[in-house]
Amino acid sequence: MATRPSRYPARMRLGISLGLAVVCGLVGSACKSESTPPIYLDAEYQVRCLDCEQHATDDPAREVSRIGGELDTKITCSVSKIDGERSLNMLLDYNPGRESQRYGLRITRGQIDSAEQNDECVVRINEGQNDYEGGCTGDDPTDALPCKVTFEVEGEIISGTVYCNRIANPSNLVSYRYVVGPGTRDKPAKFEIHNCPGL
């Protein structure tokens, strides 16, 4: 599955990276310094109950366009080299102080230079009091590896997709969900994250 084109042309994306550095002084906690552009995330996804035995209401569509530290949102990202391959750790955690309103997305040890994924790649999703977790694959999802992930790197931007088919709740293994693009049944969620340290 191909990644979506960026919402921003190349000139605008460069402006975002440079402009956000200037904004640092205005928003304080969201930025580190003028020479360290803040991490910025643009993501669209939804956790849905498409064929659950006891059909539950879908969770709300999540459409995030934020700098880390903004609006009760923690966004972290780092890239490191493991056995010569670049590995991505990424976290979105929206926590306004009420557990029922909390949501988040985490990708751990995603291989961004390869279509294949190793057994250390994991996708975790949080919706309120519910957590879901599943291993990654670069191929079609399976029961053992329910989340297909793809990555594309362009400069300081990592674009990617996530599609989870029956990702389980570790505390309730009969509870599972789909992670898809908002309002869809089988299209992947998409994200674009800027300025990951180590990239």
Image (cartoon, rainbow, N blue to C red):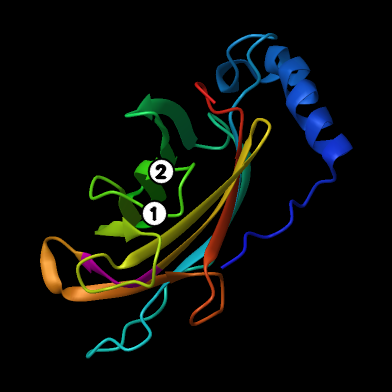
Magenta stretch, main secondary structure class: strand
Which stretch is magenta? Answer: 164-168
| Quadrant containing the N terminus in the rendered view | bottom right
Tell me if mark 2 has few (under 14), some (14-19) or many (20+) residues whose alpha carbon lies within 10 angstroms of its own.
Answer: many
Would you place residue 91 above or below residue 24 in this image? below
Which amino acid is tagged 1? Glu
Work out whether residue 144 or residue 17 is closer to the camera in this orientation and state it: 144
Q: Position of residue 46 (x, y in %)?
A: 48, 67
Q: Is residue 173 left or right of residue 161?
A: left
Q: Is residue 47 left or right of residue 189?
A: left
Residue position for label 1:
116
Cα distance between the residues tagged 2 and 1: 7 Å
Work out whether residue 181 or residue 120 is closer to the camera in this orientation and state it: 120
Q: Residue at x 49, y 56 (%)?
A: 150
Q: Is residue 94 left or right of residue 154?
A: left
Element class at badge 2: strand
Camera sees residue 62? no
Look at the image and say whether residue 39 sits in the magenta stretch.
no
